Amino acid sequence: MASGSHNDEFDPEIRNEINVEEDEIDESYAPDKDDDFVEYNYDGMELEDENWEFENDFISGSEGVGHEYEVVREDVTAIHMTRVQEDGELSEYTSHSSCHSLNSGSDSDGISYHRYHEFDPNMQMDRPALSIGLSFKDVNMLRMVLRQYAIRNSFNINYLKNDKTRLTAVCSDQTCNWRLHASVLQDGQTFEIRKLIDSHNCLNINQGENHMASAAWLAEKIEARIKMDVTVTPKVLCAEIFRCYGATVSYLKMWRAKETALQKIRGSFEESFRFIPSMCKTIVKYNPESIARYQLEENGSFKRVFVAYSASIKGFLNGCRPFIGLDGTFLKGKYKGVLLTAVAIDGNKQLFPLAIAVVEAENIDSWLFFLHWLKIGLNGSEFTFMSDRQKGLVEAVNRVFPMGYQRFCMRHVYANFQKYYKGDQLRDLFWTASRAYTRSECDTALNEIGRLCPQARQWIESIPGVHWSRAYFPEWLPCNYNQNNFTESFNKMIMDSRGLPICDMIDWIRQKMMVNLQSRRSRSERWDGIVCPKIKKILNDVRDQSRFCDLFFAGGDEYEMVAHAETHSSEDIS
Ligand SMILES: [Zn+2]
């Protein structure tokens, strides 16, 4: 009785085709996750730049350098040889594979020999090559290899014998010569290829769906890909499998494969929570000076976890302005929590992730937890925080960072404002007041708002200017941001990870940050001078505008500047 892996059971056609007796995926076997497949699909780290664009600041879009990975096929070398079997039968052998087969060859008499060699799943599974004498740790491994081999070489296999002692596989085209016979060695486990005719004279190569690419096989191949982006469609996955393996698979089969992979990923949710303590330990062990802390509920179940890597903390303290954006975003998946994030801006006006936490909800307690550990990590308190004034956040910042400043995202403040006070004029004046660099400019706009609608002015002035107007931002922080876009962009950048089990998600973000920082590092090595490109652009703009200014010397280091055209002061250049 056939007992194919449970994923094959839905498709009787496949089972008939490959005639399996036992085609379970060996769970203990973990091939090296098809590195080339992962890389091929990897989209590079351009997200951070492409996704964020400030509406009103000096920021422009992406200058990201594309990072494409291409899968390069090895050169194919065909090896032909004959081999005299013990029984006197002559077997022909043609390998269309590359270096893996070079363990076989011909001796000086022209008689082929082979060196006993063992199949190494870590090195050879992706592009397996077959040769006489090649051994496999057991029959399951051999079956997996044959499946992969058939998919890679676009043909289907039928098994004439397939049991615990012998395996005979032929090409599914009955007229074709391709044939492999393997049998068990004395240990009762190891299988060795005894006969092999590795050439086809069939015509069915590359026609229609490849039945060797079963849903179970596909699920394993796409798992890593889905972990990176749970929203990827079966259609896209089909195209990628075709490009990587040359295998055509139906939409339906891919849909089933995706469901299987998702189930496996989600199935590890509960398990993932159990790993949080050891994950925190590991983070601190391998990244000393990182902060990784968790909190459990009274019944011992997971409550919260906070992570700030030492690289982030050091990078922030040494290379960023003391300006931190805070935000929360809902998680998908089984655990309906919230991801809290702290994001800074680096010297080139790019996102610089500082810390993350997974908490039960956004409330004062969870923000207190987050800010408490953030403060310990940063070992200081004079920072400016930008937020959307979330529930509990303003008070939590006041409590943990009493010396800190708070800015409110003006887009959110305006969203509230315009609920009560509508109209284009009020809108424009509102933004003029918020963007003004001088108090007189700000006050003029406020006066005008008061003239149009006294209540609107009152509403705005109920929020102290230090929270919302550039004119009132403290001078010691040369940073003109009045919107929280950058933090939201970070959330968008990590959106694909939000459905993953918690440890996978945290590690996914870590990896994204690592690749991101490395790509910036290598880009910055090509910069000339010490001024970052985006800042250079601002300086050039300021220089251009200065043509419309006159400078009058006032003695000492002081000058008086008179502008003859509309100019912007550009404080944000440090
Ligand atoms: Zn064939």
Image: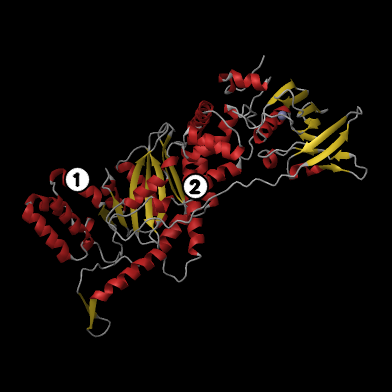
Looking at this view, name the residue that lies furthest to the top.
1
* Ligand 1: quadrant of the figure: top right
Residue 58 rendering spot, x and y as whole percentages: 32, 61
Residue 221 rendering spot, x and y as whole percentages: 58, 35
Residue 401 rendering spot, x and y as whole percentages: 31, 54
Task: Residue 416: give its label.
Answer: 1
Residue 276 rendering spot, x and y as whole percentages: 49, 39
Circle 2 sits on which residue?
43
Callout 2 secondary element: loop
Q: Amino acid at mark 1?
A: Asn
The earlier-in-sequence mark between 2 and 1 is 2
Would residue 353 be visible to someone looking at this image? Answer: no
Task: Between residue 555 and residue 180, name the one nearer to us.
Answer: 180
- Along the horizontal axis of the image, is 130 left or right of 72? right
What distance separates the C-alpha of mark 2 from that of mark 1?
37 Å
- Along the horizontal axis of the image, is 394 left or right of 299? left
Q: Amino acid at mark 2?
A: Asp
Disc 1 under 8 Å from ligand 1? The reply is: no
Residue located 49% across and 32% down the image: 234
Classify 10 Å Cα crowding around label 2: few (below 14), some (14-19), many (20 and above).
few
Question: Which quadrant of the figure contains the C terminus?
Answer: bottom left
Looking at this view, name the residue that lies furthest to the front.
203
